[in-house]
Amino acid sequence: QSVLTQPPSLSGAPGQRVTISCTGSTSNIGAPYDVHWYLQLPGTVPRVLIYRNNNRPSGVPDRFSGSKSGTSASLAITGLQAEDEGDYYCQSYDSSLSGWVFGGGTKLTV
Amino acid sequence: QMQLQESGPGLVKPSETLSLTCTVSGGSISNNNYYWGWVRQPPGKGLEWIASIFYTGSTKYNPSLKSRVTISIDTSRDQFSLKLISVTAADTAVYYCASHAIFDSFDPWGQGALVTVSS
């Protein structure tokens, strides 16, 4: 059971908007430690999609955006495309564990 | 551009020790901004942080694995290593090494090394 809770799966039609939630606690997201999001396409290495809550690395389309409020964070994807299909993970730091934590992952189907 | 590469045996017998090394290139492992960490992913499952080490040798471990894990660093070789003792089939996973600032994202990642625990 992950310290950060994500929905196991989500689906959306091309062009739609989806939101992936990441729920934590006062020892991680609510502490407040930054939240980062990763996308893992099938058979590939996870890559950073959003860092420090709402920042996109160069090359990540502005269809992807992140937000954080209280003990939760969200990743929004607009204009869903087939290439967005994959596994999405949130990640933060947890002071109680004195270490880093990942969400359980959300499998997005387009 | 910094790159990381895992190396080590792909097959380990139950009850034995899993040993992996991550070699850093294109940057110095003595960079005082970064931790050097290990993350694993069992087949079909999610990501699990295992341990991280600072260039000074300061370490952090996942409490669920702490009793079996040792992370170490060799700054002269720009390498850091992972040892996991008393492995079982549940330790079968792709093991990734990655760098990260203390409160920042894990980036970059190595390509990953599949380690299978089987007799």
Image (cartoon, rainbow, N blue to C red):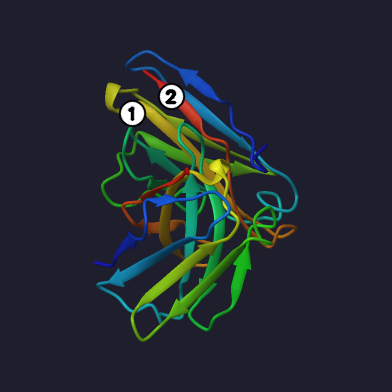
The residue lying at 34 percent from left, 23 percent from top is A79
A85 vs A75: above or below: above
Residue A33 spot, x, y in % from top left: 63, 56
Asked if marks 2 and 1 fall on the same chain, the answer is yes
Looking at the image, tell me whether mark 2 or mark 1 is earlier in sequence order: 1
Q: Residues within 10 Å of mark 1 (few under 14, many from 20)?
A: some
The residue lying at 64 percent from left, 41 percent from top is A4
From the image, tell me which residue sits under label 2: A108
From the image, tell me which residue sits under label 1: A84
A37 vs A107: above or below: below
Q: Where's the C terminus of chain A, which quadrant?
A: top left
Q: Secondary structure at mark 2?
A: strand
Instruction: Specify whether A52 is left or right of A95.
Output: left
Residue B56 spot, x, y in % from top left: 52, 84
Does the CB distance between marks 2 and 1 fall below 8 Å? yes
- The image quadrant that residue A32 belongs to is bottom right
Instruction: Specify whether B66 is left or right of B31.
Output: right
A108 vs B11: above or below: above
Q: Secondary structure at mark 1?
A: helix
Q: Residues within 10 Å of mark 2 (few under 14, many from 20)?
A: many
Q: Which mark is residue B73?
A: none
In this view, the residue in front, A68 or B116, is B116
Residue B72 spot, x, y in % from top left: 51, 75
Q: Where's the N terminus of chain A, which quadrant?
A: top right
